[in-house]
Amino acid sequence: MSNREHKIDAFLSSMSFAKNMADCDCDECGFICEVPPPPIQDAVNEHKKRKLLEVSPSQERSLISRDGGISMWKFTMPPGSQPLTEYGNSHRFIFIKNLPKGRIVKSIGEGIIGSSSEEKSRKEVSDSDWKEGGAIFYKSNGGKAIGWLNEIQDADKNLDAADDSMHVIIYTIKATDSALEVASSSCKGNVETPLPLLLSLFQKYLNIDSTEVQVDDALFLWKSVEEKLEIA
């Protein structure tokens, strides 16, 4: 090593950033301890919580079952999550599994999801239709966008990121007209699945004029589906 390189190396070694910070007593490094004091740790945890809540959560959609062209899906909607948009080519039964008290559920508006015009045209769903343990039948709307969201509220800022107590959970059973035809031909004598019951109910509610109606026999239908598919 040349004399010049030795001097440079000695100079760099004298700098605080080249030392073990635990041995450094300068104002920048201070005293390093493994566990910060409780007030500092609380402040750090609160900051992390706020940062997590600032990131808009996502809705989750998972396939539960598919039988004879009729499919069943689970939707989980955290507070403030952006809506999962589907298109109303299918007829669908919506079962409200979990709807915490005080939550506001809105249907998506018109326009590009998240745009100012879409957000302004969102509408709150009916309390009489959307209630925990209830069900609604939606006729196909010809392919228009359809979706819902669990609106964020002031109290949600105190929620921990892992807290799912305010999540809205629904199950959706979907079928197109062609899927119902296929299911009709495949379910003869099939008593091991809820398919015959689902077909009869689709046929019953397809005869209504409204595109949205509360299902009277929701409890009977849901209990049958739960038992057959062993849904927790």
Image: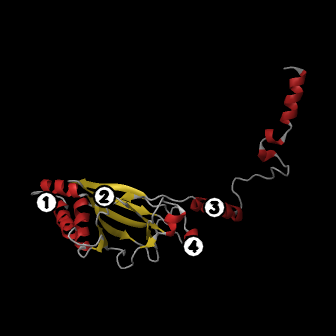
Q: Which residue is mark 1?
A: 191
Quarter containing the N terminus: top right
Q: CA distance from mark 1 to mark 2?
A: 28 Å
Q: Say few, some or many: other residues with alpha carbon within 10 Å of mark 2 (under 14 / 14 to 19 / 20 or more).
A: some
Q: Amino acid at mark 1?
A: Val
Element assignment for label 2 = loop
Q: Position of residue 174 (x, y in %)?
A: 28, 60
Q: Position of residue 170 (x, y in %)?
A: 36, 65
**Are circles 2 and 4 on residues that touch, CB within 8 Å?**
no
Sequence order check: which comes first, mark 1 or mark 4?
A: 4
Q: Amino acid at mark 2?
A: Asn
Is 231 on the left-hand or right-hand side of 8? left
Q: CA distance from mark 1 to mark 4?
A: 49 Å
Q: Which mark is residue 45?
A: 3
Q: Which residue is mark 2?
A: 89
Q: CA distance from mark 1 to mark 3?
A: 54 Å
Q: Amino acid at mark 4?
A: Asp
Between disc 1 and disc 2, the foreground one is 2
Sequence order check: which comes first, mark 3 or mark 2?
A: 3
Element assignment for label 1 = loop
Name the residue furthest bottom: 128
Between disc 2 and disc 4, the foreground one is 2
Name the residue furthest left: 189
Q: Position of residue 91 (x, y in %)?
A: 27, 62
Q: Which residue is mark 4?
A: 154
Q: Residue at x 27, y 55 (%)?
A: 65
Q: Residue at x 25, y 76 (%)?
A: 216
Q: Position of residue 219 (x, y in %)?
A: 25, 73
Q: Say few, some or many: other residues with alpha carbon within 10 Å of mark 3 (under 14 / 14 to 19 / 20 or more).
A: few
Q: Residue at x 55, y 68 (%)?
A: 159
Q: Nearer the viewer, residue 207 or 101?
A: 207
Sequence order check: which comes first, mark 1 or mark 2?
A: 2
